[in-house]
Amino acid sequence: MIDSSISPFLKHIDCIKDPRHHNIHHLLHDCLMIAICAIISGADSWIQVAEYGRSKIDWFKEFLELPNGIPSHDTFGRLFARIDPRGFHEFFTRWAQELSVSLKGKTVAIDGKTLRGSHDRSNAKSSIHMVSAWASDIRVVLGQLKTDDKSNEIIAIPELIKTLALEGAIVTIDAMGCQKKITCSIIDAGADYVIQVKENQKKLYGDISLFFQDPENGPFDIFETLDGEHGRIETRRYFTTGNLDWLQGKEDWAGISTICMAVRERDINGKTSVESSYYISSLQNHAEIVAKPVREHWGIENDLHWCLDMTFQEDRCRVRKDHAPENFATLRHMATNLLKREKSLKAGLQTKRLKAAWDHNYLIKVLVS
């Protein structure tokens, strides 16, 4: 049996139901371990996963059973195409919950991303869309759920929230998720929220924007930040109020306590632009506290989605069959969590992947991080 000291996540493998019933030549935990090690080390397809395994077979034999050697790329593809992604998601979220410990007061950003390479025209299959939860403070993916397309995020977000331990967290969502049912699911989970409001909620957006445009509706609590580098100066001003007696239909938005206007003024080489955005929140009226999750929400784009595209080449991945795209995405999220948590090497994820491929001792550090 595999040495759990270098693969603590495998203690949750009972969540994954092996879809094979007969002629099992390769053990599930062996296949999973080879796949995650390969993806950490730079593999982006089942062909590369299998080739990595063959190249490292002597090392893998030290702690895996491998009764019939390294599986072929077809075996990896068939297995992960058939594994029920619901069990794989539970396996992932149990492990991720251990990494995050307590989320009290921490920002959890929820957002979707389309896996562009997962479309299959020959079988009339469109690209899948994954909704992920990202703990910005600790830089960990907490969970993910597949939707058929971006418009179905509204349905997927409450389902994802139900699978996560979010008590005490501050959930942030862009305007797509500004829905009454979603605020209910967040409050039911024991969390708070900060959600952007745009014109998909036309009346709410109009009421809040008009309210902040009238200075007589103050006083507002105000917080300001100033950033500048490389000829760019950005000033962010946050205005919040807990005065919501005037807001029609506020009782339909579970837990709503505060509204916020964020004004971003950018000066780039002498050219100035100003942009305003609006939010609803269950947090108390304190501009500095509300400002933190507003700003941290964009970490899911910069620290997760950008890394998946640039480091893991997610949009170019041609894994397409059945459940394989969703399960491969979960493996990428596992690799991302492990690489980001490993702190001994002060380098980017691409360098860490190369180091893991070259150095077994470093790969073990990543696996136990």
Image: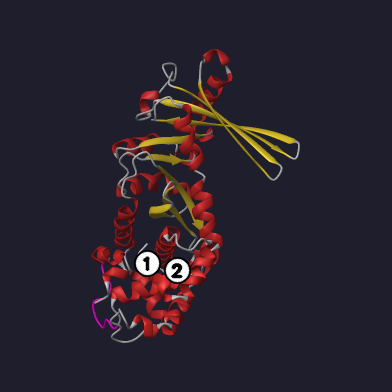
Q: Position of residue 272 (x, y in %)?
A: 71, 34
Please tell me which residue lies in front, 257 or 292: 292
Up-down relation of residue 46 to residue 139 (above or below): below
Secondary structure state at the residue bearing disc 1: helix
Q: How is the image coloured?
A: secondary structure
Secondary structure state at the residue bearing disc 2: helix
Please tell me which residue lies in front, 140 or 189: 140
* Badge 1 amino acid: Leu
Residue 342: say if magenta.
no
The residue singled out by tag 1 in the image is 367
Q: Position of residue 244 (x, y in %)?
A: 43, 19
* Badge 2 amino acid: Ile
Rendered-image quadrant of the C terminus: bottom left
The residue singled out by tag 2 in the image is 40
Q: Position of residue 233 (x, y in %)?
A: 67, 37
Mark-to-mark CA distance, 1 and 2: 9 Å
Numbered range of the magenta stretch: 17-25
